Amino acid sequence: MTVKAKSRAVFLDRDGTIIQDRGYLSSVSEVEIFSDTISSLKLLQEEEYELFIVTNQSGVAKGLISNDEVEKINGYIDEQLREAGITIRQWYVCPHESGCNCKKPAPFFLNKAAADFDIDLSRSWVIGDHPHDILLAKNVGAAGLYVLTGHGSKHLSNLPIDVPVFHNLSDAATRILNPDTADSGNYCSIQEAASLLKSGGLAAFPTETVYGLGADVFNPEAVARIFELKNRPLFNPLIAHICDLEMLDRLTDDIPDTARSLIKEFWPGPLTLVFRKKEAVPDIVTGGNPTVAVRMPAHPMALELIKRAGTPIAAPSANAFGKTSPTTAVHVIEQLGHLGYKIIDGGASRVGVESTVLSLVHDKPVLLRPGGLSIEEIERVVGKIKHQGEPELVNLESPGLLASHYSPHTPFILENGGPVDNNDPQTGLLLFKRTEIISAGPVEVLSPDGSTEEAAVNLYAAMRRLDKMGLKKIIAYKLPEHGLGKAVNDRISKAST
Ligand code: TXA
Ligand code: MG
C-alpha cells in the first residue's frame, strides 16, 4: 500500500497581500489585484502548493459591509485568478469583530484546512501584511512571511525582530520556492554572527539601507576577506558601523561640533560621517586614507549584532563589486554564493538605498554620496553643504565613488524626459509613479503615488526583477530631485550603460 504524502499549502491574507488594501471593500470596482499576484501564485501552484485565502472581515460585524458584498468580492477575485489558471482551494472568511474562535491569529481555519484537505501545516506557509498573520503561522507551526505591501510598512515596528520581511508577494514566493538559498546553511542567529565576527569571520547583516557584509574593523585579515569575497578593489574604503558613541571614540578623537549636531539629530540612521581617523584604525579599512567613515545603522538587528560583537564592524554593501545592492537576504546569497560568510535574515531593508556620505574634515561639510537621508534634512541642521561635484572639490577624498556602479546585466538606459508609450515587448520600463502610458513590455512602478521615499525602498528589487527577465533593454525615467529623488537618480544614472 502506498500512502500519499500530505500536501503543502500557502495561506494568503487578502487585503494588502494579494490585492490593494482600500479599507472595507463593498464593490468589485474597488478591487485592484497586485501586479505580481498572478505570476507569484502560478509559480507556487506549479510547485504543488495548495493555495488558500484567510481573511478577517470585521466590517461585517461592524455593519459597514454585508456578507453578500464580501462574498461577491471574493467571488470576483476567485474568478479573476481562475481565469489565469489559479485554483484557490478554499476561502476562509471571519466576519466577526470579537468573541469568535476564527478571527486571525486564531488557528481555527488552518486546522480545518489541515483536516479537510490533508495539509501538513509544519511544511506550510502564511503570507500577510499584518503581525497577526505571522502569529497565525506560529500558532499552527507553519512559517510566516511578512510583506510590506498594504499595511505592512506601517506595522513593521510591531513585528518580532526574527521574522523574515519581504517587499511584496513576489519576493515572499521567491523565498518559498528557493529552498536552495533558504536552507543553504548560510542563515544564522544574531549571536552566531557576533561570535563569528569576534573570531575573525564574515557576517552579512540587515540594515535599514541595504545589507552589509561585515568584519571586525580591528582585524585587517578579516577585512581583507571582505574585499576578496566581493571582488572589490582595495582602494575603496569601508564604512565602520557602530552601536553607541563610545565606539566612535575608538575610531576618531576629532569630533567637530557639526558632527555632534548631526549625530544628535540623525543617528541611528542612514547618514555616514567621515572623520579624521585614529592611528589604530587599519589602512585596509580606510583605503589608506587618513580618514574613517562611520555610521550607526537604524536597524535593531544590526545594533544588537554590533553590541554583541563588541567592536565596530567594517562593512560595505553585501553585493559583488559594481552590482546592484541587496535589500533582502536572498539577494545577498544570489550574489555572493554560499561560501565564506553567514547571514542574518532581517527581511527587506526599509530605506532601500545606501546611506548619505558626508565628510566633516573640511571647513564645511562636503557631500560625497547622496543617499537615504535627504540633503534638505541635513541642511536644516547644519546649513548649506558643499557638493562633491562642485569644481574645487572634484577628486577630493572619495575614491570609491566610481562612475559605474550598481549595474544590472541588461543594457540600462536613463531617460531625462517623461515616460512615453513603448511598443517593444523586449523593453522593460522603470517608472517613478503611476503613469498613463501603454507598454508592450514589463513595467515596474517605484511608487504609484509618487513618493521618493517609497521609490528608494523599491528601487533595487525592481531593478533585479526587470534584470532577470532577459530583456533587450531597460529604460529608466528620472525622479524629481527633491527628497530621496537625488539618491535614486544617482543610483540609476550609475547603473546606466
Ligand atoms: O548604507 C550604507 O552605507 C551601506 C550599509 C551596509 O551601511 N554601506 C555601503 O557601503 O553602502 P559601500 O562600501 O558600498 O559604500 C561606502 C561609501 C563608498 O562610496 C566609499 O568610497 C565611501 O563610503 N567611504 C568610505 N570610507 C571613506 C573615507 N574614509 N573617505 C571618503 N569616503 C569614504
Ligand atoms: Mg492584510
Image (tube, rainbow, N blue to C red):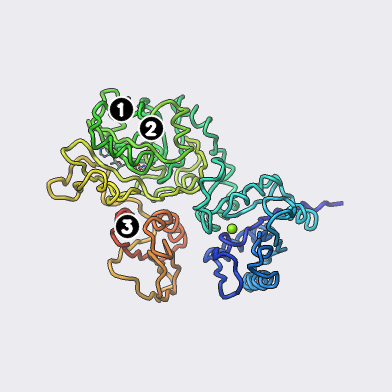
State the quadrant of the C terminus.
bottom left
Q: How far apart are the two marked residues, 2 and 3, measured between alpha carbons?
A: 27 Å
Question: Label for residue 485?
Answer: 3
- Left of 306 or right of it: where is 53? right
Which one is in front, 156 or 177?
Answer: 156
The quadrant where residue 21 appears: bottom right
In the image, residue 394 above or below residue 24: above
Residue indicated by mark 2? 242
Residue visible at 30% across and 27% down in the picture: 251
Q: Amino acid at mark 1?
A: Leu
Q: Amino acid at mark 2?
A: Ile
Residue visible at 25% across and 31% down in the picture: 255
Question: Label for residue 251?
Answer: 1
Which one is in front, 96 or 439?
Answer: 96
In the image, residue 478 above or below residue 310: below
Q: Give how far across and how far down residue 381 sits, in percent.
A: 26, 44
